[in-house]
């Protein structure tokens, strides 16, 4: 009796193709069933943060927190000596500072101005100096102008505040939210350097961690 021929799909030449297809299917199925590893996952590092404040800031007014690309740890505060000890997971590598009262603050030193440190490790204590954001009035040669006029801050919600620029040529606002308009009414004898006439000069806050700088010339 003549033997029945094998089906075409069982031909030996097609075996490698079947093996490849099965392998690809297994990989695709595994990607659907098995969870992807967490980004930046890994053991936590215990770090010590040493905080100091300038411009009359009180440590009790400051809040510290740890942030990563997309994650944030609960906030905490430094103790009376300015120390703060916490565990920082691998996914969170920056220490940031905020004011409990909303006063605009930043870390001294980093450029551009920032409220957060660079990536940190547990190798040594992290030393942070916190300072207030300020409004500065200078002449064209970079010297501060004492008693340079009146500062008016207008918030987007309609609230406003004002104060005179003191003998230091600087003003430390209680609040400086994003989008607020900061205006300077120069003292007699001065006018904005970027204006051909004397009058009010205004700037909109786009980077709350940076100082607001006005430059004046003699009118």
Image: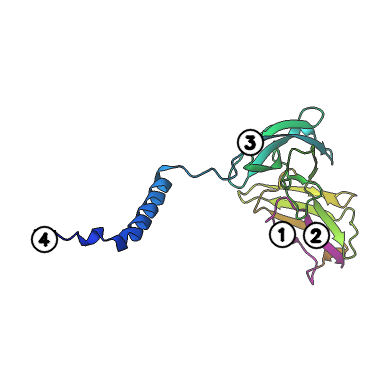
For residue 214, which numbered disc appears in the image? Answer: 2
- Asked if labels 1 and 2 touch by Cβ distance under 8 angstroms, the answer is yes
For residue 43, which numbered disc appears in the image? Answer: 3
Q: Compare marks 4 and 2 and give the one earlier in the sequence.
A: 4
Q: Compare marks 2 and 3 and give the one earlier in the sequence.
A: 3
- For label 4, the residue is 2
Residue sitting nearer the eye, 13 or 46: 13
Mark 2 residue element = strand
Q: Nearer the viewer, mark 4 or mark 3?
A: 4
Q: Nearer the viewer, mark 3 or mark 1?
A: 3
The residue depicted at 75 percent of the width and 55 percent of the height is 112
Query: Residue 17 appears in which quarter of the rendering?
Result: bottom left
Residue 210 lies in the magenta-colored region: yes
Image check: 102 left or right of 149?
A: left
Q: Rounded to the nearest whole Å, what is the CA distance between mark 4 and mark 2?
A: 102 Å
**Picture coordinates of residue 5 (x, y %)?**
17, 61
Image check: 23 left or right of 94?
A: left
């Amino acid at each position: 009796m003549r033997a029945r021929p094998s089906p075409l799909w069982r031909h030996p030449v097609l075996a490698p193709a079947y093996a490849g297809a099965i392998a690809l299917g297994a990989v695709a199925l595994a990607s659907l069933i098995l969870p992807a590893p967490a980004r930046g996952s890994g053991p936590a590092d215990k770090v010590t943060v040493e905080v100091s404040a300038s411009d009359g800031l009180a440590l009790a007014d400051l809040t510290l927190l740890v942030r990563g690309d997309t994650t944030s740890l609960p906030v905490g505060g430094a103790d009376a000596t300015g120390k703060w000890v916490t565990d920082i997971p691998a996914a969170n590598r920056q220490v940031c500072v905020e004011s409990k009262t909303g006063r605009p603050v930043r870390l001294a030193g980093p450029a551009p101005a920032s409220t957060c440190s660079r990536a940190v490790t547990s190798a040594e204590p992290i030393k942070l100096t916190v300072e207030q954001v300020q409004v500065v009035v200078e002449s064209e040669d970079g010297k501060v102008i004492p008693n340079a006029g009146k500062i008016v801050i207008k918030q987007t919600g309609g609230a406003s505040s004002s104060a005179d620029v003191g003998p230091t040529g600087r003003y430390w606002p209680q609040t400086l939210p994003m989008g607020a308009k900061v205006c300077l009414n120069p003292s007699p004898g001065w006018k904005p350097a970027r204006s051909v006439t004397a009058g009010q000069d205004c700037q909109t806050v786009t980077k709350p961690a940076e100082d607001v700088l006005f430059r004046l010339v003699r009118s």
